[in-house]
Amino acid sequence: MSQPEAISPFELPNWVDSALLKGMLRGIERESLRMQSNGFLSQGDHPKTLGSALTHPHITTDYSEALMEFITPPKETIPEALNFLTDIHVVTHKNLENNEKLWPLSMPCMLDDEEENIRLAEYGTSNIGRFKTLYRHGLGVRYGRRMQTISGVHYNVSFPDELFETLQQNETDEKLQALSLQDYRSHRYFGLIRNFIRLTPLVMFLVGASPSVCRCFMTGREHQLLPLISGTLFLPHATALRMGRFGYQNSAQKELGIHYNTLSGYLEGLQKAVRTPYKAFSLLGLNDADGNPIQINDHVLQIENEYYSLVRPKQVPEAGETPSEALANRGVGYVELRAVDVNPYSPIGINEDTAGFLEVLALYCLLKDSPDLLDDEMEVVERNQTEVVNRGRAPNAFIEENGESIFIETWAERYLSEMKPLADLLNQAYATDLYGNALGVMQARVEEVDHTLSSQVIEDTKKYNGTWGFGSHMAQLHEETYDAHDLSDETIAYFNELTQRSLQQQEQLEQQCTQTFDEYLAAFR
Protein backbone atom coordinates (compact mmCIF):
# COMPACT_ATOMS: atom_id res chain seq x y z
CA MET A 1 0.00 0.00 0.00
CA SER A 2 1.29 3.44 -0.85
CA GLN A 3 2.46 5.85 1.81
CA PRO A 4 0.14 8.71 2.77
CA GLU A 5 0.54 11.60 0.37
CA ALA A 6 1.94 14.72 2.02
CA ILE A 7 -0.64 17.51 2.09
CA SER A 8 0.68 20.98 1.30
CA PRO A 9 0.08 23.91 3.65
CA PHE A 10 -3.17 25.76 3.01
CA GLU A 11 -3.29 29.12 1.27
CA LEU A 12 -6.58 30.87 0.65
CA PRO A 13 -7.00 31.49 -3.10
CA ASN A 14 -7.35 35.22 -3.80
CA TRP A 15 -10.51 34.66 -5.88
CA VAL A 16 -12.48 33.25 -2.92
CA ASP A 17 -14.83 36.06 -1.96
CA SER A 18 -17.00 36.31 1.15
CA ALA A 19 -20.09 36.84 -1.04
CA LEU A 20 -19.74 33.22 -2.21
CA LEU A 21 -20.53 31.98 1.33
CA LYS A 22 -23.83 33.78 1.91
CA GLY A 23 -25.98 30.84 0.84
CA MET A 24 -24.57 28.46 3.45
CA LEU A 25 -27.10 26.48 5.46
CA ARG A 26 -26.70 24.66 8.75
CA GLY A 27 -28.90 22.39 10.83
CA ILE A 28 -28.34 20.73 14.21
CA GLU A 29 -29.41 17.38 15.67
CA ARG A 30 -29.00 16.97 19.43
CA GLU A 31 -29.68 13.83 21.46
CA SER A 32 -30.56 13.77 25.17
CA LEU A 33 -31.82 11.12 27.58
CA ARG A 34 -34.91 11.68 29.68
CA MET A 35 -34.09 10.94 33.30
CA GLN A 36 -36.36 10.37 36.26
CA SER A 37 -36.20 12.61 39.32
CA ASN A 38 -34.16 9.89 41.11
CA GLY A 39 -31.57 10.02 38.31
CA PHE A 40 -32.38 6.71 36.67
CA LEU A 41 -33.23 6.41 32.99
CA SER A 42 -36.88 7.15 32.27
CA GLN A 43 -39.15 4.14 31.87
CA GLY A 44 -42.05 6.28 30.68
CA ASP A 45 -43.49 6.62 27.19
CA HIS A 46 -42.44 9.43 24.87
CA PRO A 47 -44.83 12.23 25.94
CA LYS A 48 -47.91 12.16 23.70
CA THR A 49 -48.23 15.93 24.09
CA LEU A 50 -45.04 16.18 21.99
CA GLY A 51 -46.68 14.30 19.13
CA SER A 52 -45.55 11.16 17.33
CA ALA A 53 -41.87 10.28 17.47
CA LEU A 54 -42.40 8.50 14.14
CA THR A 55 -43.62 11.48 12.14
CA HIS A 56 -42.67 14.69 14.04
CA PRO A 57 -40.04 16.62 12.04
CA HIS A 58 -38.26 18.19 15.04
CA ILE A 59 -38.86 16.05 18.16
CA THR A 60 -38.29 12.32 17.87
CA THR A 61 -36.46 9.48 19.59
CA ASP A 62 -33.25 7.69 18.70
CA TYR A 63 -32.37 4.24 20.06
CA SER A 64 -34.38 4.06 23.24
CA GLU A 65 -37.78 5.38 24.21
CA ALA A 66 -35.97 7.70 26.63
CA LEU A 67 -33.36 8.99 24.14
CA MET A 68 -34.83 12.12 22.61
CA GLU A 69 -33.53 13.66 19.40
CA PHE A 70 -34.10 17.31 18.52
CA ILE A 71 -33.73 18.36 14.88
CA THR A 72 -33.67 21.89 13.52
CA PRO A 73 -34.51 22.68 9.90
CA PRO A 74 -31.70 24.19 7.77
CA LYS A 75 -31.11 27.79 8.81
CA GLU A 76 -29.31 30.71 7.18
CA THR A 77 -27.29 31.74 10.26
CA ILE A 78 -25.88 30.11 13.38
CA PRO A 79 -28.01 32.25 15.76
CA GLU A 80 -31.18 31.20 13.91
CA ALA A 81 -30.26 27.51 14.21
CA LEU A 82 -29.40 27.83 17.92
CA ASN A 83 -32.58 29.82 18.63
CA PHE A 84 -34.72 27.16 16.95
CA LEU A 85 -32.93 24.44 18.92
CA THR A 86 -33.61 26.43 22.11
CA ASP A 87 -37.32 26.60 21.28
CA ILE A 88 -37.39 22.80 20.81
CA HIS A 89 -35.78 22.28 24.22
CA VAL A 90 -38.22 24.65 25.94
CA VAL A 91 -41.25 23.03 24.28
CA THR A 92 -39.96 19.60 25.31
CA HIS A 93 -39.25 20.71 28.88
CA LYS A 94 -42.81 22.03 29.25
CA ASN A 95 -44.19 18.64 28.16
CA LEU A 96 -42.02 16.30 30.24
CA GLU A 97 -43.97 14.36 32.84
CA ASN A 98 -43.32 13.25 36.44
CA ASN A 99 -40.54 15.78 37.06
CA GLU A 100 -38.33 14.27 34.36
CA LYS A 101 -35.31 16.23 33.17
CA LEU A 102 -33.01 16.15 30.15
CA TRP A 103 -29.64 14.56 30.96
CA PRO A 104 -26.91 17.05 29.91
CA LEU A 105 -23.94 14.72 29.22
CA SER A 106 -22.98 12.57 26.25
CA MET A 107 -22.37 9.54 28.49
CA PRO A 108 -25.37 8.20 30.43
CA CYS A 109 -25.71 7.76 34.16
CA MET A 110 -27.75 5.66 36.57
CA LEU A 111 -28.40 2.66 34.31
CA ASP A 112 -29.37 -0.39 36.33
CA ASP A 113 -27.86 -3.85 35.90
CA GLU A 114 -30.60 -5.13 33.61
CA GLU A 115 -30.07 -4.09 29.98
CA GLU A 116 -33.68 -5.00 29.22
CA ASN A 117 -34.70 -1.99 31.32
CA ILE A 118 -33.36 0.23 28.55
CA ARG A 119 -36.63 0.41 26.63
CA LEU A 120 -36.46 0.30 22.85
CA ALA A 121 -38.03 3.24 21.08
CA GLU A 122 -41.60 2.46 20.03
CA TYR A 123 -43.32 3.96 17.00
CA GLY A 124 -46.78 2.44 16.96
CA THR A 125 -48.29 -0.47 15.05
CA SER A 126 -47.60 0.51 11.44
CA ASN A 127 -45.14 -1.70 9.56
CA ILE A 128 -42.60 1.12 9.26
CA GLY A 129 -42.96 1.85 12.99
CA ARG A 130 -42.47 -1.81 13.95
CA PHE A 131 -39.54 -2.04 11.52
CA LYS A 132 -37.80 0.88 13.26
CA THR A 133 -38.23 -0.82 16.65
CA LEU A 134 -36.94 -4.14 15.29
CA TYR A 135 -33.86 -2.36 13.91
CA ARG A 136 -33.16 -1.07 17.42
CA HIS A 137 -33.74 -4.54 18.87
CA GLY A 138 -31.13 -5.83 16.43
CA LEU A 139 -28.65 -3.16 17.54
CA GLY A 140 -29.17 -4.27 21.14
CA VAL A 141 -28.63 -7.92 20.24
CA ARG A 142 -25.48 -7.10 18.30
CA TYR A 143 -23.77 -4.50 20.49
CA GLY A 144 -25.68 -4.31 23.76
CA ARG A 145 -28.22 -1.71 24.75
CA ARG A 146 -25.86 0.31 26.96
CA MET A 147 -23.85 1.52 23.97
CA GLN A 148 -27.05 2.89 22.48
CA THR A 149 -27.69 5.29 25.39
CA ILE A 150 -24.80 7.56 24.39
CA SER A 151 -25.81 11.03 23.17
CA GLY A 152 -24.11 13.28 20.65
CA VAL A 153 -24.53 16.33 18.46
CA HIS A 154 -24.64 16.11 14.67
CA TYR A 155 -23.87 19.31 12.78
CA ASN A 156 -25.16 19.51 9.21
CA VAL A 157 -23.67 22.06 6.82
CA SER A 158 -24.03 22.85 3.13
CA PHE A 159 -22.37 25.40 0.87
CA PRO A 160 -24.06 27.36 -1.95
CA ASP A 161 -23.83 26.28 -5.58
CA GLU A 162 -22.20 29.61 -6.43
CA LEU A 163 -19.17 28.56 -4.41
CA PHE A 164 -18.92 25.21 -6.21
CA GLU A 165 -19.36 26.90 -9.60
CA THR A 166 -16.52 29.30 -8.84
CA LEU A 167 -14.31 26.49 -7.53
CA GLN A 168 -14.93 24.49 -10.69
CA GLN A 169 -14.14 27.48 -12.94
CA ASN A 170 -10.75 27.75 -11.23
CA GLU A 171 -9.85 24.06 -11.59
CA THR A 172 -6.84 23.29 -13.77
CA ASP A 173 -7.81 19.63 -14.26
CA GLU A 174 -9.84 19.30 -17.47
CA LYS A 175 -11.67 16.22 -16.15
CA LEU A 176 -12.92 18.21 -13.15
CA GLN A 177 -13.89 21.13 -15.37
CA ALA A 178 -15.97 18.77 -17.53
CA LEU A 179 -18.05 17.35 -14.64
CA SER A 180 -21.68 18.32 -14.16
CA LEU A 181 -22.25 20.67 -11.23
CA GLN A 182 -23.88 17.81 -9.30
CA ASP A 183 -20.87 15.51 -9.77
CA TYR A 184 -18.39 18.28 -9.08
CA ARG A 185 -20.22 19.24 -5.88
CA SER A 186 -20.08 15.60 -4.72
CA HIS A 187 -16.37 15.48 -5.60
CA ARG A 188 -15.65 18.52 -3.42
CA TYR A 189 -17.82 17.33 -0.54
CA PHE A 190 -15.92 14.05 -0.50
CA GLY A 191 -12.70 16.05 -0.29
CA LEU A 192 -14.20 17.85 2.72
CA ILE A 193 -15.08 14.49 4.29
CA ARG A 194 -11.55 13.09 3.89
CA ASN A 195 -10.00 16.19 5.44
CA PHE A 196 -12.52 16.19 8.28
CA ILE A 197 -11.59 12.57 9.07
CA ARG A 198 -7.91 13.59 9.13
CA LEU A 199 -8.74 16.45 11.49
CA THR A 200 -11.21 14.64 13.74
CA PRO A 201 -8.56 14.53 16.53
CA LEU A 202 -8.69 18.33 16.52
CA VAL A 203 -12.47 18.22 17.09
CA MET A 204 -12.06 15.68 19.90
CA PHE A 205 -9.35 17.75 21.58
CA LEU A 206 -11.18 21.09 21.33
CA VAL A 207 -14.83 20.14 21.95
CA GLY A 208 -14.60 16.64 23.45
CA ALA A 209 -16.55 16.58 26.73
CA SER A 210 -16.68 12.91 27.77
CA PRO A 211 -13.45 12.22 29.71
CA SER A 212 -15.27 10.18 32.37
CA VAL A 213 -18.17 7.75 32.65
CA CYS A 214 -20.59 6.57 35.28
CA ARG A 215 -19.45 3.17 36.61
CA CYS A 216 -22.83 1.69 35.67
CA PHE A 217 -22.07 2.22 31.98
CA MET A 218 -19.16 -0.24 32.20
CA THR A 219 -21.18 -3.05 33.81
CA GLY A 220 -20.03 -6.38 32.41
CA ARG A 221 -17.24 -4.86 30.32
CA GLU A 222 -13.48 -5.14 30.70
CA HIS A 223 -11.73 -1.78 30.80
CA GLN A 224 -8.62 0.07 31.92
CA LEU A 225 -10.45 3.08 33.32
CA LEU A 226 -9.47 4.42 36.74
CA PRO A 227 -11.68 5.53 39.63
CA LEU A 228 -12.06 9.33 39.70
CA ILE A 229 -14.54 9.61 42.55
CA SER A 230 -17.25 7.32 43.93
CA GLY A 231 -19.25 5.85 41.06
CA THR A 232 -17.21 7.53 38.31
CA LEU A 233 -14.41 6.15 36.12
CA PHE A 234 -12.05 8.14 33.91
CA LEU A 235 -8.69 8.41 32.21
CA PRO A 236 -6.57 11.30 33.55
CA HIS A 237 -5.99 12.99 30.18
CA ALA A 238 -9.01 11.74 28.20
CA THR A 239 -11.08 14.07 26.02
CA ALA A 240 -13.90 12.10 24.37
CA LEU A 241 -14.38 8.52 25.57
CA ARG A 242 -17.64 8.55 23.61
CA MET A 243 -15.52 8.48 20.44
CA GLY A 244 -13.27 5.64 21.63
CA ARG A 245 -13.67 1.92 22.04
CA PHE A 246 -16.26 2.31 24.82
CA GLY A 247 -18.46 4.38 22.51
CA TYR A 248 -19.99 3.60 19.15
CA GLN A 249 -17.76 0.86 17.82
CA ASN A 250 -18.42 -2.05 15.51
CA SER A 251 -15.61 -4.51 14.74
CA ALA A 252 -17.57 -5.90 11.79
CA GLN A 253 -17.65 -2.46 10.20
CA LYS A 254 -13.88 -2.11 10.35
CA GLU A 255 -13.67 -4.94 7.82
CA LEU A 256 -15.99 -3.21 5.36
CA GLY A 257 -13.38 -1.24 3.48
CA ILE A 258 -15.77 1.67 2.92
CA HIS A 259 -13.74 4.52 1.46
CA TYR A 260 -14.49 8.20 0.95
CA ASN A 261 -12.48 8.69 -2.23
CA THR A 262 -15.44 8.74 -4.63
CA LEU A 263 -19.21 8.78 -4.25
CA SER A 264 -19.56 5.64 -6.37
CA GLY A 265 -16.97 3.75 -4.30
CA TYR A 266 -18.62 4.83 -1.06
CA LEU A 267 -22.06 3.71 -2.22
CA GLU A 268 -20.69 0.42 -3.51
CA GLY A 269 -19.10 -0.34 -0.12
CA LEU A 270 -22.26 0.61 1.74
CA GLN A 271 -24.47 -1.54 -0.48
CA LYS A 272 -22.13 -4.49 -0.09
CA ALA A 273 -22.39 -4.15 3.70
CA VAL A 274 -26.20 -4.19 3.74
CA ARG A 275 -26.22 -7.31 1.55
CA THR A 276 -23.37 -9.37 3.05
CA PRO A 277 -24.06 -11.84 5.89
CA TYR A 278 -21.68 -11.67 8.87
CA LYS A 279 -21.00 -14.89 10.73
CA ALA A 280 -21.16 -13.47 14.26
CA PHE A 281 -24.57 -11.94 13.51
CA SER A 282 -25.78 -15.10 11.75
CA LEU A 283 -25.04 -17.08 14.93
CA LEU A 284 -27.38 -14.77 16.84
CA GLY A 285 -30.26 -15.96 14.68
CA LEU A 286 -32.97 -14.00 12.96
CA ASN A 287 -35.82 -15.02 15.27
CA ASP A 288 -36.19 -16.08 18.88
CA ALA A 289 -37.46 -19.47 20.07
CA ASP A 290 -41.07 -18.33 19.62
CA GLY A 291 -40.45 -17.24 16.03
CA ASN A 292 -40.42 -13.50 16.79
CA PRO A 293 -37.79 -11.53 14.81
CA ILE A 294 -34.83 -10.25 16.84
CA GLN A 295 -32.91 -8.46 14.07
CA ILE A 296 -33.80 -7.33 10.56
CA ASN A 297 -31.19 -9.59 8.97
CA ASP A 298 -27.77 -11.10 9.70
CA HIS A 299 -25.83 -8.75 7.42
CA VAL A 300 -22.88 -6.56 8.37
CA LEU A 301 -25.39 -3.70 8.44
CA GLN A 302 -29.11 -4.26 8.96
CA ILE A 303 -29.75 -0.97 7.14
CA GLU A 304 -27.48 1.84 5.95
CA ASN A 305 -27.93 3.98 9.08
CA GLU A 306 -26.14 1.33 11.15
CA TYR A 307 -22.82 2.45 9.64
CA TYR A 308 -21.13 4.44 12.44
CA SER A 309 -19.05 7.08 10.71
CA LEU A 310 -17.41 10.28 11.91
CA VAL A 311 -18.95 12.22 9.04
CA ARG A 312 -21.58 11.34 6.44
CA PRO A 313 -22.37 12.58 2.95
CA LYS A 314 -26.11 13.31 2.88
CA GLN A 315 -28.91 14.11 0.47
CA VAL A 316 -32.53 14.67 1.46
CA PRO A 317 -34.41 11.49 0.43
CA GLU A 318 -37.59 11.77 -1.57
CA ALA A 319 -40.57 9.49 -0.91
CA GLY A 320 -39.51 5.85 -0.99
CA GLU A 321 -35.78 6.54 -1.42
CA THR A 322 -33.06 5.06 0.78
CA PRO A 323 -30.20 7.39 1.79
CA SER A 324 -27.96 5.70 -0.82
CA GLU A 325 -30.53 6.11 -3.56
CA ALA A 326 -30.88 9.81 -2.75
CA LEU A 327 -27.09 10.22 -3.02
CA ALA A 328 -26.90 8.21 -6.25
CA ASN A 329 -29.76 10.18 -7.83
CA ARG A 330 -28.88 13.75 -6.82
CA GLY A 331 -25.35 13.68 -5.41
CA VAL A 332 -24.19 15.04 -2.05
CA GLY A 333 -26.36 17.89 -0.79
CA TYR A 334 -24.74 18.45 2.59
CA VAL A 335 -22.41 16.81 5.12
CA GLU A 336 -23.22 15.62 8.62
CA LEU A 337 -20.38 16.17 11.11
CA ARG A 338 -20.91 13.51 13.78
CA ALA A 339 -17.81 13.57 16.00
CA VAL A 340 -19.21 16.20 18.38
CA ASP A 341 -19.86 15.58 22.08
CA VAL A 342 -22.77 17.19 23.88
CA ASN A 343 -21.55 20.30 25.69
CA PRO A 344 -22.90 19.84 29.26
CA TYR A 345 -22.51 23.55 30.00
CA SER A 346 -24.94 24.58 27.26
CA PRO A 347 -28.69 24.15 27.88
CA ILE A 348 -29.02 23.01 24.25
CA GLY A 349 -25.84 20.88 24.09
CA ILE A 350 -23.93 23.21 21.76
CA ASN A 351 -23.02 26.90 21.73
CA GLU A 352 -21.93 29.56 19.22
CA ASP A 353 -18.24 28.83 19.76
CA THR A 354 -18.54 25.17 18.77
CA ALA A 355 -20.89 25.95 15.86
CA GLY A 356 -18.60 28.69 14.55
CA PHE A 357 -15.52 26.50 14.87
CA LEU A 358 -17.21 23.59 13.05
CA GLU A 359 -18.21 25.84 10.15
CA VAL A 360 -14.72 27.32 9.82
CA LEU A 361 -13.33 23.79 9.93
CA ALA A 362 -15.81 22.57 7.30
CA LEU A 363 -14.92 25.42 4.94
CA TYR A 364 -11.22 24.76 5.52
CA CYS A 365 -11.71 21.06 4.76
CA LEU A 366 -13.64 21.94 1.60
CA LEU A 367 -11.03 24.34 0.20
CA LYS A 368 -7.85 22.49 1.24
CA ASP A 369 -6.19 19.91 -1.00
CA SER A 370 -7.57 16.46 -0.16
CA PRO A 371 -5.74 13.49 -1.69
CA ASP A 372 -7.34 10.04 -1.52
CA LEU A 373 -7.52 8.57 1.97
CA LEU A 374 -5.95 5.11 1.67
CA ASP A 375 -5.64 2.29 4.20
CA ASP A 376 -2.14 3.18 5.41
CA GLU A 377 -3.10 6.75 6.20
CA MET A 378 -6.40 5.64 7.74
CA GLU A 379 -4.44 3.50 10.20
CA VAL A 380 -2.45 6.59 11.18
CA VAL A 381 -5.64 8.64 11.55
CA GLU A 382 -7.17 5.97 13.79
CA ARG A 383 -4.03 5.92 15.99
CA ASN A 384 -4.27 9.71 16.26
CA GLN A 385 -7.92 9.48 17.25
CA THR A 386 -7.16 6.88 19.91
CA GLU A 387 -4.31 9.01 21.27
CA VAL A 388 -6.52 12.09 21.59
CA VAL A 389 -9.55 10.21 22.96
CA ASN A 390 -7.53 8.56 25.73
CA ARG A 391 -4.72 11.03 26.49
CA GLY A 392 -5.20 14.15 24.38
CA ARG A 393 -4.53 16.48 27.33
CA ALA A 394 -1.30 14.72 28.36
CA PRO A 395 1.85 16.92 28.18
CA ASN A 396 3.44 14.43 25.79
CA ALA A 397 0.40 13.62 23.62
CA PHE A 398 1.39 13.62 19.98
CA ILE A 399 -0.06 13.37 16.49
CA GLU A 400 1.48 11.40 13.63
CA GLU A 401 1.48 13.23 10.32
CA ASN A 402 3.58 12.79 7.18
CA GLY A 403 5.90 10.40 9.00
CA GLU A 404 6.55 12.79 11.89
CA SER A 405 5.40 12.84 15.52
CA ILE A 406 4.16 16.31 16.49
CA PHE A 407 3.07 17.51 19.93
CA ILE A 408 -0.68 17.97 19.81
CA GLU A 409 -0.54 21.63 20.81
CA THR A 410 1.91 22.41 17.98
CA TRP A 411 -0.26 20.46 15.53
CA ALA A 412 -3.50 22.13 16.63
CA GLU A 413 -1.90 25.58 16.64
CA ARG A 414 -0.78 25.15 13.03
CA TYR A 415 -4.24 24.21 11.79
CA LEU A 416 -6.04 26.93 13.73
CA SER A 417 -3.57 29.44 12.30
CA GLU A 418 -4.31 28.25 8.76
CA MET A 419 -8.06 28.57 9.45
CA LYS A 420 -7.93 32.17 10.60
CA PRO A 421 -8.38 33.74 7.11
CA LEU A 422 -11.50 31.59 6.69
CA ALA A 423 -12.91 32.82 10.00
CA ASP A 424 -12.30 36.38 8.76
CA LEU A 425 -14.05 35.54 5.49
CA LEU A 426 -17.10 34.14 7.31
CA ASN A 427 -17.17 37.13 9.65
CA GLN A 428 -17.23 39.36 6.59
CA ALA A 429 -19.94 37.30 4.85
CA TYR A 430 -22.27 37.46 7.87
CA ALA A 431 -21.24 40.89 9.21
CA THR A 432 -20.39 39.33 12.57
CA ASP A 433 -17.44 38.56 14.82
CA LEU A 434 -18.81 35.12 15.78
CA TYR A 435 -16.35 33.07 13.73
CA GLY A 436 -13.24 34.93 14.83
CA ASN A 437 -14.37 34.73 18.46
CA ALA A 438 -14.99 30.99 18.11
CA LEU A 439 -11.48 30.43 16.79
CA GLY A 440 -10.14 32.57 19.65
CA VAL A 441 -11.86 30.33 22.20
CA MET A 442 -10.36 27.23 20.55
CA GLN A 443 -6.93 28.88 20.48
CA ALA A 444 -7.19 29.52 24.23
CA ARG A 445 -7.92 25.81 24.78
CA VAL A 446 -4.77 24.89 22.87
CA GLU A 447 -2.67 27.37 24.86
CA GLU A 448 -4.08 26.24 28.23
CA VAL A 449 -5.35 22.67 28.33
CA ASP A 450 -7.27 23.39 31.54
CA HIS A 451 -9.63 25.50 29.43
CA THR A 452 -10.79 22.50 27.40
CA LEU A 453 -14.30 21.20 28.03
CA SER A 454 -12.93 17.79 29.02
CA SER A 455 -10.72 19.33 31.70
CA GLN A 456 -13.64 21.36 33.07
CA VAL A 457 -15.83 18.25 33.17
CA ILE A 458 -13.24 16.41 35.27
CA GLU A 459 -12.96 19.30 37.74
CA ASP A 460 -16.72 19.70 38.07
CA THR A 461 -17.29 15.96 38.37
CA LYS A 462 -14.97 16.02 41.39
CA LYS A 463 -16.61 19.20 42.73
CA TYR A 464 -20.11 17.69 42.60
CA ASN A 465 -19.06 14.24 43.86
CA GLY A 466 -19.42 12.21 40.70
CA THR A 467 -21.05 12.02 37.29
CA TRP A 468 -24.55 11.90 38.75
CA GLY A 469 -23.93 14.92 40.99
CA PHE A 470 -22.44 17.00 38.18
CA GLY A 471 -25.04 15.97 35.61
CA SER A 472 -28.00 16.58 37.92
CA HIS A 473 -26.59 20.00 38.90
CA MET A 474 -26.29 21.04 35.24
CA ALA A 475 -29.72 19.58 34.42
CA GLN A 476 -31.23 21.75 37.15
CA LEU A 477 -29.46 24.87 35.85
CA HIS A 478 -30.65 24.13 32.31
CA GLU A 479 -34.21 23.63 33.57
CA GLU A 480 -34.08 27.13 35.06
CA THR A 481 -32.91 28.47 31.69
CA TYR A 482 -35.83 26.78 29.92
CA ASP A 483 -38.28 28.17 32.48
CA ALA A 484 -36.94 31.70 31.90
CA HIS A 485 -37.26 31.45 28.10
CA ASP A 486 -40.46 32.94 26.69
CA LEU A 487 -41.89 31.24 23.63
CA SER A 488 -43.74 33.47 21.17
CA ASP A 489 -47.41 32.79 20.51
CA GLU A 490 -46.43 31.93 16.93
CA THR A 491 -43.90 29.32 18.12
CA ILE A 492 -46.38 27.74 20.55
CA ALA A 493 -49.00 27.52 17.80
CA TYR A 494 -46.45 26.03 15.38
CA PHE A 495 -45.43 23.23 17.74
CA ASN A 496 -49.03 22.55 18.80
CA GLU A 497 -49.99 22.13 15.16
CA LEU A 498 -47.03 19.77 14.56
CA THR A 499 -48.08 17.66 17.55
CA GLN A 500 -51.58 17.15 16.16
CA ARG A 501 -50.44 16.66 12.57
CA SER A 502 -47.77 14.10 13.54
CA LEU A 503 -50.29 12.05 15.55
CA GLN A 504 -52.70 12.11 12.61
CA GLN A 505 -49.93 11.03 10.23
CA GLN A 506 -49.01 8.08 12.47
CA GLU A 507 -52.66 7.06 12.67
CA GLN A 508 -52.98 7.20 8.87
CA LEU A 509 -49.88 5.00 8.46
CA GLU A 510 -51.38 2.47 10.84
CA GLN A 511 -54.69 2.43 9.02
CA GLN A 512 -53.08 2.08 5.59
CA CYS A 513 -51.21 -1.15 6.39
CA THR A 514 -52.27 -3.84 3.89
CA GLN A 515 -49.55 -6.39 4.76
CA THR A 516 -48.87 -8.18 8.00
CA PHE A 517 -45.55 -7.25 9.57
CA ASP A 518 -44.24 -10.76 8.84
CA GLU A 519 -44.99 -10.22 5.14
CA TYR A 520 -43.45 -6.75 5.22
CA LEU A 521 -40.26 -8.05 6.87
CA ALA A 522 -40.04 -11.08 4.57
CA ALA A 523 -40.22 -8.78 1.54
CA PHE A 524 -37.38 -6.63 2.96
CA ARG A 525 -35.26 -9.65 3.84
Image (cartoon, grey):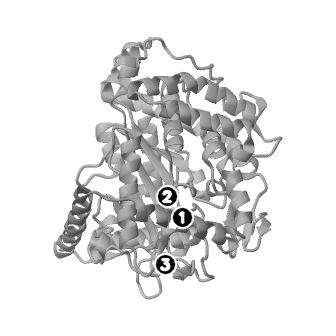
| Farthest residue, direction right | 396
Disc 3 and disc 2: Cα gap in Å? 19 Å
Q: Residue 124 lies in what quarter of the image?
A: bottom left
Mark with earlier residue (1, 3)? 3
Q: Mark 1 or mark 2: which is in front?
A: 1
Residue that mark 2 sits on: 347
Does residue 5 sit above or below 34 in this rendering?
above
Going 72% across and 74% down the picture, which residue do you hit? 231
Q: Nearer the viewer, residue 231 or 256?
A: 231
Mark with earlier residue (1, 2)? 2
Label 2 residue SS: loop
Q: Is residue 297 visible?
A: yes
Type of amino acid at the residue the image marks with label 3: Ser
Type of amino acid at the residue the image marks with label 2: Pro
Going 28% across and 72% down the picture, which residue do you hit? 127
Going 66% across and 75% down the picture, which residue do you hit? 216
Instruction: Find residue 353 and report its horizontal and vertical position in percent.
Output: 53, 41
Mark 1 surroundings within 10 Å by alpha-carbon count, few (fewer than 14), some (14 through 19), many (20 or more):
some
Instruction: Find residue 234 and report its horizontal and vertical position in percent.
Output: 74, 62
Q: Is residue 374 visible?
A: no
Q: Mark 1 or mark 3: which is in front?
A: 1
Instruction: Find residue 23 and report its horizontal and vertical position in percent.
Output: 33, 30
Disc 1 and disc 2: Cα gap in Å? 8 Å
Label ID, residue 42: 3
Residue that mark 1 sits on: 477
Type of amino acid at the residue the image marks with label 1: Leu
Instruction: Find residue 246 and report its horizontal and vertical position in percent.
Output: 66, 61
Relative to 322, 447 lies left or right: right
Q: Are marks 1 and 2 in contact (CB under 8 Å)?
A: yes
Relative to 316, 401 lies left or right: right
